[in-house]
Amino acid sequence: MIRTERLTKIYNRGESREVVAVDGVSLEIGSGDFLVVSGPSGSGKTTLLCLIGLLTRPTRGKIFLNDREVSSYSDSWQTRTRREKMGFVFQQHNLLPQFLVWENVSLPLLCRDVGLSERKRIALNVLHRLGLGSRSDFKTAQLSVGEQQRVAIARALVTDPEIVLADEPTASVDVETAADILEIFRHLKESGKTIIAVSHDPALVSEGDTTVELRSGVLAQSRRM
Amino acid sequence: MRFQRHVNLYAYAVKCIFTYKARTVSIVSSLVIAIMVLGAVAFLADGLEKEAELSAAFAPDVTVQYLQAGRQIPIPMKYAEVIDRLDGVKTAPRVWGYVYFHNRLYTVMGIDPSKMPIPKEINLAIAPGRFLKVDDRRAAVVGDFLAKSFGLRVGDVIVLYDQSMRPFNVTVVGIFTMDVRLYTADLILIPIEDARAFFEVGEDLATDLCVYVESRAQSRFVAEQILKNIPNARVLTREVLREALLAAYGARSGFVSVVWLILLVSAMLVAWNQASAVSTEARREVGILKALGFGTSDILEVRLVEAVVLGALSASIGIFLAIIYVVYFGAPVLKEFMLGWAAIYPEFPLPLHIKFSTLFTLYAIGVFPLLVGSVIPAWTSAITEPDVAMRGT
Amino acid sequence: MLLLSILAASLALLVVEKAFRIFRKWKSADEEEKYELEKQFYLTYAVVYIVFAIRMFAVPLYFWTMQTLVPMIPGAMCLWGVFNTLPVLCWSTLALKFALPVLYFGWLILARINDGCKRNPLIRNLMGLYIALSPVLMADSLVDLMIFSRLTPVQVACCTSAIDVWARPIPPLVLGISSQLVLLVSYLALSTAYAPLCYAALRKPIFEWIVRASSLALIPMFVITVTEVLTPWILNLPLHHCPFCLLYLAPTSIVFFATLWFSMAVPWWTLLTRRLGRADEESLELESRLRRDLWTIAGLSTIVGVALIAIHLIVATT
């Protein structure tokens, strides 16, 4: 489903502070696979995730999604692809404080032809499934850290994406919440979603079908679990 | 619905306006001041234009005055006979002048209703009461504002004092309505015989002559003939009077527009400054939105819609305040400049006329400069990289 | 009016350099460089939208502003008189005001096609067209500035001197005593034939050229018909032929002006999309679909315009 060919990302190209964040990474991720990307700090894990999630452009190399070369798409078409096919879970939950919980969850639906009542219905549905139905009208600041991260996951799932990308989803939460999040990811895997997660959490790593390790931007190891 | 996406984005834009309150308040307040000034001038100018049009409607086709050493003096009545010899022309004399009444200057005008073709619409211009009749003596029709100022009603007596300080009583028989205020605010209209007696002007003289032409298209031709036949005449056609009034108010409002332009440039600079001062928080928000599926064009649309909404809001508030300023506060400072009356003239209630084209212009002026001032900051914000959200920077 | 002209000109000038850069570098750029150029393109896109919006708003403002000058110009009784104060500038800007929106909307149509494609195939064509358009955009603003800075209250002849019956003997001389009826019937017949031609253009490209030729013929015919027939008949003033007076005294006539303008602009938009909107397979498909929609709307617009003319005439004569 997702394939990368010699993917390379160089920041500050041509300058003295040039950094090769990802260097020639070739990967293949099947539909429904759970890929975990690990590696030391600064090894290019987040950059790789951004590249696959079409959040940034590769300097060299290609990205294929369902055999279509999406890396050469225009910005608007990459956005469209991202909107229709992907959901993101950030390390910092990145909820917007001026919106209520259900409004935060429904943000990805704003750019679709979905009216207010329908957006609310879909958002409440997802929140209920994650056990946050009673918090839907709260401000995000009124939630615990664990609840905020679960809201962020709900936001990633509201468009029913084929691919879920997560950057250290359990890094900033307690053990109990981490277990809840793990359970959510298990359900996502069972429902056939393709998951790509950056993580050091051994519990999350053990859930993955495939683990890849990056060192200095290069694919050092790939292990099928 | 295909447009639902745009509706969603517009709703988000409105929410952003209320989120960044400091920015909103600074932009709106600077623009409101500019629009309010221009709006007040525009409404006043439009009102004066409308009044001038109405006044011109009641004016004679041609007015003939007599000059000596460049100044107006009474015109000999023999010239009325000269003018009457022209085909399709009728002449009526007027005797008028100014009088102090309760420390204000008013115009006392004497006319001869038998010689002056009174338009049918005149009765619409008088309520209550009636216009002067041919056999009236010591009767007067007064302006609405004069009547209100002194609580005059039909049947009341006004005591004027002539040049020899002798009392001169006239009875009010009619009061002009508000519609012709520019022309009639300070007017006391009396029979010509009374005016001659009051101003001590002989039967062989008049202050000026009103000339009425059967075919209005011939006014200019008649004016030319009068000039040829009467040396030292100053001949004013209705169009000249109307254009002079409109040009005067237009020139005054044009001057104020220069001042207004400075205010508007300041408002644009404030808008630019505020829009450019994008906080880290705001940048992060854009990065998050882009990661969630908002495109660069969507963010641009949101920011530009914000500018349009702020501009329209500022224009609406500015227009509302301009109306309050003119109607309820009497446009202090601006009034003296626009009307040019001296303090000894009676208080003149300001005409207010709001035209669609003026509103259109004010809204265009509220929206477009702000839009232009916001486009580059909006673009800078919109091209924020979405991976900013991932990195939390 | 002056303010809007200055704003439009300044903005238009601001992005010309960016347009040049995108135009020069796009072909040889790699993906990352293209992405950077695309970001610049967004600014150009936003500016173009705003400048076009300003120029479109400026059109009624221009007419209203000129109308307010009528009392200030001795001899002027309508816009015709005001235009006669600076005839070369005023009449040329009038032509620009009708012609430029055709180019503006053409650009926007091409941008719409580009937006629907995955790889910005038309970005270079869009920038090239913008570079070609920008002098005209500037000229539009500059001419407005020149008019309002040079306008003086000189004595002018108004419309009666130019277009009232005794100044225009030609139509009755050529077409006889029923010249007005002949003109009206001819114009309506040609317009009515124009609508099915638009639908035929959907099927065969040769008809596109026939429609283009027809639109070129229809433009002067429309002007003559408005002057000779529609103005005196709609206003019930048999000797008065000033189109400005028609627009001022019968403001609903602007609707049929607009619909017929649209129907006559479509052939040129489709020419533009054919020439500049087909860079790859994807854009070809999109362009074909859009072109079909445009021809359909052109046909409908013509029918609506003709119907509105008929309604105006019926209302005026009853």
Image: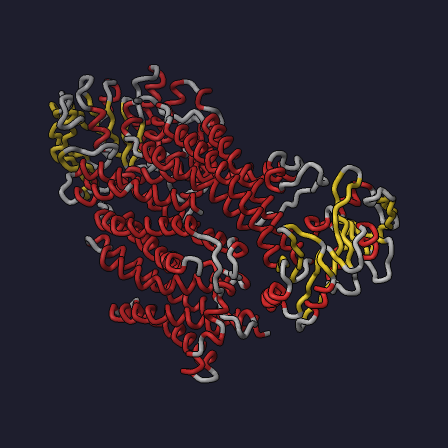
Residue displayed at 66% across by 73% down? B87
| Closer-to-camera residue (C30/B42) | B42
Where residue A51 appears, x then y in whole percent? 21, 32
Instruction: Judge whether residue B174 can be spotted in this image.
Output: no
| Closer-to-camera residue (C180/B150) | B150
Residue B33 sits above or below residue A216 on the image: below
Residue A172 sits above or below residue B65 on the image: above
- Residue C137 as seen in the image, left or right of residue C28: right
Residue displayed at 17% across by 42% down? C25
- State the image quarter where residue A78 is shown: top left
- Residue C74 as seen in the image, left or right of residue B341: left
Q: Number of labelled discs?
A: 0
Where residue C128 appears, x then y in whole percent? 23, 49
Residue C200 sits above or below residue B26 on the image: below
Residue displayed at 68% across by 63% down? B211
- State the image quarter where residue B105 is shown: top right
- State the image quarter where residue A14 is shown: top left
Where residue C287 appears, x then y in whole percent? 27, 57
| Closer-to-camera residue (B331/B356) | B331
Task: Please identify the residue farthest to the bottom as the structure is shown.
Answer: C176
Where residue B202 appears, x then y in whole percent? 80, 56
- Residue C84 as seen in the image, left or right of residue B336: left
Task: Please identify the residue farthest to the top as the structure is shown.
Answer: A174
Instruction: Judge whether residue A63 can be spotted in this image.
Output: yes
| Closer-to-camera residue (C198/A140) | C198
Q: Quadrant of the C terminus of chain C?
A: bottom right
- Residue C118 as seen in the image, left or right of residue B285: left
Task: Please identify the residue farthest to the front as the structure is shown.
Answer: B69
Residue displayed at 51% across by 60% down? C76
Q: In the rendered view, how is the structure colored?
A: secondary structure
